[in-house]
Each structure stands twice: as C-alpha cells, then as structure tokens.
Amino acid sequence: MFTFLLKALWRKLWTLFFVSIVSFAVIHLAPGSPSQIDPMNPSFTKEQLERYRAAFDLDKPLYIQYTLFYQRLFTGQLRSFKDNQPVLGKILERAWNSLPLFLVETILIWCYAFPLGIAAAIKRNSLFDKVTTVLVFALISIPGFYLAYLGIIFVVENFHVDVIGLRTFGREGVGGFYQLMDRTWHLVLLSVLGATAGIAVLSRYVRSQMLEVIGSDYVRTARSKGVAEDAVLYHHALRNGLLPFVTMLGLLIPGLIGGAVILETIFAWPGIGRLGYEAILSRDYPVVIALNFIAAVLTLIGTLVSDLLYMLVDPRIRL
Amino acid sequence: MTTNTQALSPSRLAWQSFLKNRTAVVGMAAVMGFFAVALTGLLLTKGEHPILNPREVRLPDKLKPPISTPNREAVPAASLPRLGVYVLGTDELGRDVFARMLEGGFVSLSVGFVAVGIAVAIGLLLGGIAGYYGRSRVGVWRLRLLTVDTVITGLIDVMLSFPSFFLILTVVAVLKPSIWNIMIVIGLTSWEGTARFVRAEILSLREQEFIQAAQAVGVPGYRVILRHLIPNSIAPVLVSATLGIAGAILTESSLSFLGFGVPPPDATWGNILSDGKRYIFDAPWLTLIPGTAVLIVVLAFNLFGEGLREAFNPKLRQG
Amino acid sequence: MLTKRFLILAPTLVSLFLFQSYFWVPTFEDQVKGDPGRLTRYISASLGDASILNPTLSADAASSEVNSLVFEGLIDRDLDLSFRGRLAESWKIFEEAYLLVDESLKLSDGAPATAKVLLDRLNAAKRSQAQALRLVQTIELLPGATVTEEVRPPAREKRSQGAQPAKVVIRRPPRLKFTLSEVDQDFFEELDRLLGGYVKRLDPLKFVTAPDPAIAQAVAEERISATEANPVIIFNLRRGVHFHDGHEFDSDDVRFTYETIVDPRNLSPRVPDFEPVKSVETPDRYTVRVTYKRLFQPGFESWGMGILPEHLLNREQLRREALRAGKDQEKFSVRDSAFNRSPVGTGLFRFVEWKTDQYIRLARFHDYWEGPANFKEYLIRIIPDLLTTEVTFYAGTADAYGAQPHQVARLQNDPRFHAISFLALGYTYIGYNMRRPIFQDPRVRRALGMAINTDEIIRYVLLGHGERTTGPFPRQTDYYDPDVQPLPYDPDGAARLLSEAGWKKNGDGILEKDGKPLAFTIITNSGNEERSAIMVIAQNAWRRLGIQVQALTMEWAVFINQRVDKGDFDAVVLGWSMGLDADIYQIFHSSQTGHFQLNFVGYQNPKADELMVRIRQEYNNERQVAMAREIHRLIAQDQPYTFLYVRKNLALMDAKIVRMKPGPDGKPQYLPFVPNKLGRVNFHFDEWVKTPTPVLPPYRSEISAR
C-alpha cells in the first residue's frame, strides 16, 4: 500500500509539472500587454511601453518568465497586474467567500441526490422515475444564467428583498442573529441554483449504481431468503451500492475553486469564479494562470484522496 | 462485421431495449425534429435575399410580442415579414425573431457537431493508439523510458486536471472569440472521456480471439484498429458524443453570456439569448424563446444519449 | 428504518432552515428593518471596480467617482459651468512675454535695434497709448549671457549616432520682458507691426556656434526663441483647509501634485494636460504661481484635478515605505505606494475601506471646510451585471444607478423613483476614411449621411434619450453653433448627390463609376449594442441606395490597434467623449493624421487647422466662441463624419432621497434637486438625505440642449 501511495504521488508530480506548463502556455498563445497600459491612450510613448514590459518581465525569454512566475507564486510575491495586490492573498480571500457557498451547495447536492436516485431506482419505470428522469435532465439542460435570471426576477418581483451579493447591502450594526440569517438568505437562491446540476448528475449516478446492485446475485439471494424488502434495500443493497460514493468526497475538493463563473458574476458574489472572470476581462494574467494552476493542483489532490479512499473501502484493491 | 454469431446481435438487442424506453424515444424524435428545423432554417435564411430575412432591420417594429402584425404605415413594403406576422416577435432592432431562431439553429447545431467531431476524432485516435500500441516505448534518442500508454494517459490526466469551463473561457479570451476558435477549443478540451473509453475498450477487446486471429494472420495494426477495434467500441463513443453535443451547445451559450460567444453576424441561440436578456422585463419573449429552445434541444440530446447508454449497458438494460 | 427516515428528513430540514431566513431580511419598503442607520448611507451601484484611488494616476470612471469625493481640486465648475474656486480662493491669469534684442538688426528707420533704442521707442509708444501695448504693464530688460556646452548630436539623426559630443557656444542675447495684464495671442503680431517688422526678422540661429549646422539648428530651436509667451496663473489658496488626517493643506501640496504627474516614473495619464507647464512655484504657503511654456488655454481646467497630500507621499515617506516593503528604494514611485488603495485628500468624504470587486466605503469628513455632508457614509457597490444592478435597485440595496433607455422608459412614471437624464459630453458618429478615393468627394460623404434617418435612430434605439448633433463641440457649451442645420433625411436627395458625383446605377441596381461598384465595409467594436445597431441600420440604408456594404464588428483591441490606428478601414461607427473646453486639435488637425493619432479619418482643412491652433491660445471666452463656431461650420460643411447624436445619460434614484437644509426655525427644510447647466443634479450632494418615506414628488429631468 505504501508503494502504491508513492507511485501515485510520483505520477501526480509529473502531471503537476505538465499542468504548470500548460497553465502558463495557454496565456502565451497570443501576445498581450499588461492591463494597466491602455493602447488607446496617446500619452504612452514607445519607451514607456517598453519600461512597462520590463517591469513585468515581459521582455524576457519564455522559460525565464516561467520560472520567475512559479518562483514568485510559491513565495507569495506574485502580484496582480490589475491592482498590484499579492495574487495568493486575493485567491485566498475569494476562496474564503466561496467556501460557505460550496458547503451549502454540497450539502444540498448530497441531501437531495441520494433520496432521489434511490427512490428512482427502487421504483424503476414508475411515473415517479420517469418524471424525475426528465426533470433531472431538464436541470442539466437549462442554461444556468437563464435559470438564474428567472429565479432572481421571481424572488425580487414577488418578495421585494435583496438576493444579490453576500448580504443585504447597506444594512449594518444589526444583531448577530439578524446578520446570520441575512447571510443565509443570500446563500439560498445562489446555492439552490448552483446545486441543481450537481443534484441532477449525482442522482443519476446513484440511480444506476442502485440498479446494478439491486440486480446483483447477493440481493436476489437475500430476497429469496425472505429478508424484509426494506431491510434488503436499505441494509444490503444501499451499503454496497453506495460505497463507491465515498470516494467522491475526494473529488469534491476541486469544486471549491472550479467555481461558478456565471452564477457568481450574476449574483455579484465575490468568489473565486468571479475573480477569474474579472481577471480574464482585464487581462490580469498572473491571476488567470495562478487560478488555472491551483484548480488543477486541487483536482490532483482530490483524485489522490479519492484513490486512497477507494482503497480503504474496497478491500479487493490492494496494489 | 463478423460478430453476428448469436441470434440477436448486441446492437439489435440494444436497439430493442432502447425502443422500450419511451422518454428516450421522445428525445430521439425531438433531436430529429431539431435537425429538420436547422436544415430548413439554413435553406430559408441563407443568401442575399432569403425567404425569411433574419437581418432585416425595422426600427418602428422593435420589440413586438409574438404573433403580432407589422406596422404597415411605418415599415417599407419591401421590409415586411414574408409571413405577414411576426411569429415569435421582433428584437430590439425590429428583426424577426423567428427568422433569427431558424438561422441560429443551424449555427448552434454546427457548433455542437464540429466541436464534438473534433473531440471524438482526437479521442478515438489517442485512445486507439494507447490501447493498441500502449506497450511500445517512445523517447528521445536512446532513452526510451516511457510507454505510449504512459504518455497518453499522462496527457489525459493533465487535461482532466483543469476546470474545463474556466480553461475554455481563458483560451477563447486569449485567442479572441470566433466561431471556429470556439468549436476548436471546446473540441480540444473534451476528448478525454472518449479517449479513456476507447482505450479501456480496446485493451479488453485485444485479448479476444477474433483480434488475436487477425493479428496472427498478419493484418497490419492500423487495419486491426480501424476495421475491428473501433467499430466494436463505437457504441459508447456514440453515446458520449450525443451527450457531448448537448454540452457543447450549453457551453456556447454560457460563453455568449460572458461576452465570449460566437460573435455577430452569426446568430446562435446562445447569443440571441444573451442579447435578449437585457430586455427581460420589457420583452420577455426575447429571453424565453431562445432559452426554452436551448432547454428543449439540450434535453432531447441528453434523454436520447441517456437512453442509448442504458440500452448499450447490459447491466442496466430493461428486462 | 433509520436510514430511510434519515434520507427523507435530511433534505427537508436543510430546506426549511434555508428558507426561513427570508423572514429576517428587509424589503424595499422596509429598508430600516433592524437598522435605522440605512438612511444615513448613500449607495451607488457601479458596473466596474475602481483601479487606483489617486487622481493623478487614474483614468477609469469608477476610480474617478471615488477620487472626486475624496480629493478636491483648486477649482471646479459652478452651476452655470463658470469656474468656481475650491481649494483656491481666487486666481489671476496674465502673461509674461519675452523678445530677443538683436543689436545687429536695424529698425525700419535705420536705427540699430539696441536695447536702449527699443526700450525708448516702446515706452514712448506706450505713453501715446499704442494699440499694440494696451495690455502691457511693465517692460524690463534682462541681460544676456554666453555659455559653452557639450552637446550630443540629436538622437533622431541616425547617421550621427555615436558621434563625439560637439562643443556648442550659445551667446544668449539680452531680452525684453513684457508683463501683460491679460493673455493676448496676437501681441507679437501687433508688436512686429509697431516695430516695423523687427520681430519677424529675428533669427535665433545667429546666436549659436557649432561645428555641425544640424546641431546648431537643433540647439537654436530648443534653447533660444525669438519670442516667448508665458501665461501665468497665480492661485491664492484657501486657508485653514485640512486633509483627512488633520494635516493642513498648503501650496507645497499643489506643487507636489504637479511634480507627481510630470515625473516619468509615475506614468501618469494626465501628462498631456500638464506638459505645457513650465514651472510651478510657491512664493509662500498660500500662493501658487504656475507658468506655462506657451499659450494653452485648455490647461486651466486641469487645475480642477485632485490635490495630493505632500506629507504622505514625499521622497522621504516613499523611501520609508519602500524600506518597509523590502522594495528597491530607487525604483519605488508614487504609483507603487499603498496610498493608492487608502487615499487621503481634502474632499467631502474620507476613505474607509475597499474590498476589491465588492465595494468601496467612504465616510463623511467632519472638518470639511464648507461643512460636513448630510450622509454619514457613501458606498460604491460593484455589481458587474446590468440586469442584477436593476434588480438590486428594486430591492432597495442601491440608491441610484446609471440606467438604460428601456429601463427608464418603463419606470419614468413610477413614483418610487427619481428619473434623471442629462445630455452626455460626447457624440456618436460615422467616420469615413478620407484616404480612400471613394470618400474624398464631400458629396459622397454628405449623401451617405443624408441616407441615414438619425431621428429614427434616436426615437427607436435611444427611445428618445438623445439629441441630434451637427459638429465637434459639446451641445451644452457656447462653442456649439446652434445655427448649423443637421443633414436632412433624404434618400432621394442622397441618390441625386451620388449621381452628381458620378455614381450611376448599373443593371443590377448597384451604383457604379468607371465600371467599379460603390462598395465598402463599415466596422465597429463588439460589445457596444448601440454602435452595432447603428452599423446595421446604416448598412441597411445604404444598401437601399444601391451601395454594397459589408458590416463587421470586431473585438476592441483588434478594432483599435489593427484597424483604426493604422488607418486600415473604410467607415467606422465610433463615439468621442469630450471635455468642456474648445480644444479639438488632436481629433481634427491635419498634423494628427499619422498612425496611432486621433485624426484617423485623415481630415484636412487649412482654414480649420489655423483656427484650431488659435483657439487653444485664446484666453478670451467671446473670441473663443466665435472661433469655435466657425470651426463648427467648416467641419459641418466638409462632413468628415456623419455626426449622429449626443446621447443622454440616464439614472434612476430612490425617490426617498431629497435635499435637506435646516430652516430658520431649526426644522429640516426639504428642497428639490437643482440641475447644473449640464443637467447633473449632484451639485448639492452635501445637502442630500434619505427619508423613511418620500417627502417630495419624484424628480423628473426636463432638460433640453437649449
């Protein structure tokens, strides 16, 4: 098992190396200049532009820029083109804002996907199964921003309350409980919208996993031995059918940074996704590269964790 | 194809099972309907003087609701809509939304098809090579350290590490949005699933007798891949392609929303939707029509694809 | 079964918890729920975040909004747009003019032009009240000097690069210094007439000796000029004004602000406004003397720029900051300072905090010299999406936002909101590249303009929130000539004009001349729906005339860098945003037609050229107006652009906001908004308050250009 871990780590490190190259190279597909230089501004002379390029190391060969970039990123010295703030600090601050959203979304997804998927599998081909199937697919098929607008307009038009941002803006100095509930309310619509696709996908997985298990020999055996139906389903089938989902805990990690670019932009939520979008718009390349890279690193960590979890729950795998 | 040894071939079996799944059949019908609409749209809206002109501007008739008649006094006779009414209303410049939707249908469909075509081509190629030639070694000079399989699965790992939408957004932003860039970028970032699939399928197939027989007779490798291995693993690829088209259409509309979609003059459902959302309070049909259209088409592709998946997976096949 | 119950209970409980939070959130009608302080905060919504909170370095709209509240300039514009003193209590503008004395020249009557002769003659003329000297107050003689210098050959001459430094002798002759009570750009012209052509015969090259004539020429041009006219502004500063940190404001701060702008390390976008300044001196704590290198009237307005605190940003402070941050002290400039994210000024509000992409919080400054504002806080909330901005406004968590025409059209009768509209300082136009043969004929440009129904565009695209414009100056100013008539919408007339210009319809209905069809491409930048709409409308209109028109939108950077700046386009839809001054030199002068310059359409008119130069040197408003109107007529005649319209800026505001002043009995007195000449209502922002319910009928702008 220890060798397995080492092997997996070694592989991830290689992947990480190439990930770092790809993140960096993507930005250099086309020549660009730092955002603080307005090409329309006639007052910038050629010399000033050159000085700018030099200040941001844009005049150096690519491989040197590459090493400088990651050196600065890891030492926390990398600064955003846009506001000269440290990139890592910005990302951490935004990650902190995205965290509650991520948690609530995850809770919603797991709370809803399992009951829905299990029920659909048990009542296969019933009306319930068909309706949830179509509904679930409708949720994956709807453009997210379209649903978001419909949702926001519905709530604001009918209830006249704020749903945009972290909290009701301009309301300060209110009691702690008010504040907590205010923040919770601002999470509701956004996280429900953010969770829809997740619920849809996960509940489909759960359903097909359950179907496989229900059709397997040991469940049939249990049934034929006269074990009560509920016990068969919830004891035997569920436990084995859902074991693989434990490994999904690892895959949740990258969701933290993968972020919902569109939803966060619409809701003016100062999270990671919006940070990325604003950085792309203002050609704030250090932030864009760093975000792509960190997201990839988290994915790698996530897969590693999920491999390990898989090994723990499934005794057949001992590599 | 010479595997037809049983009474019913696996594909025939799958087909029969598919036909029993009513939602999937409805999905398939809707997909066919969409093809018909897109092709009709192409015929009706192409050229300098199309039958239904999606580019005709009639300012006095701006933002007319669906099924309203044109203002014959203010609009020149030559500009009146061919059908006598604005079936789906007009947009902020008085252009006929029906004609624009017809025009956009074909473009949206081609974005989906070309993107997925690219993804499937790459996936098949790399997956096939990794599966069949996986054990041969490559390297620089005499250092032949890596197997083909390691290189390709490594590449897949690297690609899978990135949050795909953010990566697409970054690349499209750097390259400047154009219909070709969008198709290529979506294609280049969504081949990994297919490649993995094909690789696994071929790894298991190549141990089977008919392949080993072919190899023993001395059939060259590429022929074995093309004539035997790929046709045998094509079913799951088709399934994922169907779902992929749905995904690509959605991705395009999300990119449009963020301002990085297919630029005008090409109309797509995505950019009609994101242009129309400004007027959601004044002219809700500009949002509802393309939004619902995207929803229905993507849902149809998803249901169709899911039906195919269940039908091709013996464990999930309906009894 | 436990599992089963859990599976049903968990989602139900989670949902219940989430949804009950609704009952704790305030509605639009009840904004003070749990927080009466809401009424003391003004919240404005902005689409973009600020970039740098330093008035000398910022260029974007969001930063400017904050900077105008935190900082204050020496002057600003009053309700009627005349200048008003802020940090400067008063000012005086006069001129100092210098004339070389060349003894080797002879005056018209044969007398040598020695300093004495010149002085005598001028004093005599002044006593007899000669017209040329009517503004002259004093005349002094300044002695000359001889200097020997080593000069490197001018860099622009490639062939002499690397050459040895040349020894140059400059014999600077004595000069006469005139002090004029007003700036007069024709002073030397008249003086030359008085002195019988003496001024025009002066040749600076005489006073320079160098081995290479090219070097001599360059040095003479740079170091010695026959005449020099230096406008001078004396600002008398307001006493007892304090920065937000309590430090007193004085003349050093003004000088320091100027130095910050012109310091090349700071890369200030304001450099062009201050480049003509020769020196800024501070004779005492409350006096600033600004001397310009040449006559440049538009320079005065730039003193409205926010003044920086010298005591926080001077060399010593920067050095310490660099040391703390572990940066290179030599390279560390004002642009690098943390000041730009936590500014300190003398303005109505002081800076509190800035959360990137979320909000910027300002609090009122209690020691503001004109008295503190009514609002306790000013928040700028950043919401990147137009539609959510609107929705936020309905929910009552933004007090005002810049609205779109269709939003105002829908809500202008809603009593819950003020609807404010005012003409923008800028215009939208279609520009024709006059380097292209087809556009060289003014009849063609006129015909293209006549084919476009601008009134229809204003009516349907802008929903009436715009007005036609006919020339290059802002409609609200006197520079705009109201007598210039807009082009009529007349497609038949346009067709006749085109046929006069030689374009006839061929068999396919396409206009043709010498066998070549009339075909071109119109482009604009993507992302601006108004411009794309105009492009499509123009394309449609021109096609009806029989012109083959392609229409394309392209990404801003490509559009500007690769097409407009390089002159590689036929026709463009674009807009200019203007200042309130009469300076359009960069946009229409024939010297500005090169790559990356702003006269990218290649407009040339010698008469207009001369006027555009003269208008910048004219300090008299009446004469400026006369010149500007003449330029306006010339440009309207030539139609380098099809001038379309000036759009109105629109804003919606919560109707609970009104002006409030304590009345004579101490009770609050509520007053309606008063717009300035531009139609903006925030002139009295310090008097604004928000009341729990509307106390006055909602404000509706009734503004027309004139």
Image: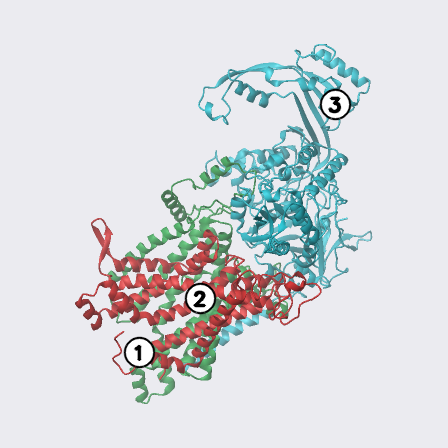
| Amino acid found under the numbered disc labelled 3 | Glu
Circle nearer the N terminus (1, 2): 1
For this orientation, the residue located farthest to the left is: B216
The answer for how far apart the CA atoms under marks 1 and 3 are is 104 Å
Image coordinates of residue B252 in percent, x first then y, are: 48, 62
CB of mark 1 within 8 Å of CB of mark 2? Answer: no
For the N terminus of chain B, the image quarter is: bottom left
Q: Which chain is cyan?
A: C
Q: Position of residue B215 (x, y in %)?
A: 19, 67
Amino acid bearing label 1:
Pro
**Foreground of the two, C416 or A59:** A59
Q: Is residue C36 visible?
A: no
Colour green belongs to chain: A
Q: Which residue is mark 2?
A: B247
Q: Colour of chain B?
A: red
Which residue position holds label 3? C190
Under circle 3, the secondary element is: helix
Of all residues, the one furthest to the top in this rendering is C111
Against C566, is B119 above or below?
Answer: below
Q: Element type at marker 2?
A: helix
Could you tell me which chain the residue with mark 3 belongs to?
C
Left or right? Give the position of B98 relative to C426: left
- Residue C469 in picture, x, y percent from top left: 70, 48
- Residue C648 % position (x, y): 69, 52
Q: Which residue is mark 1?
A: B10
What SS does tag 1 mark? helix
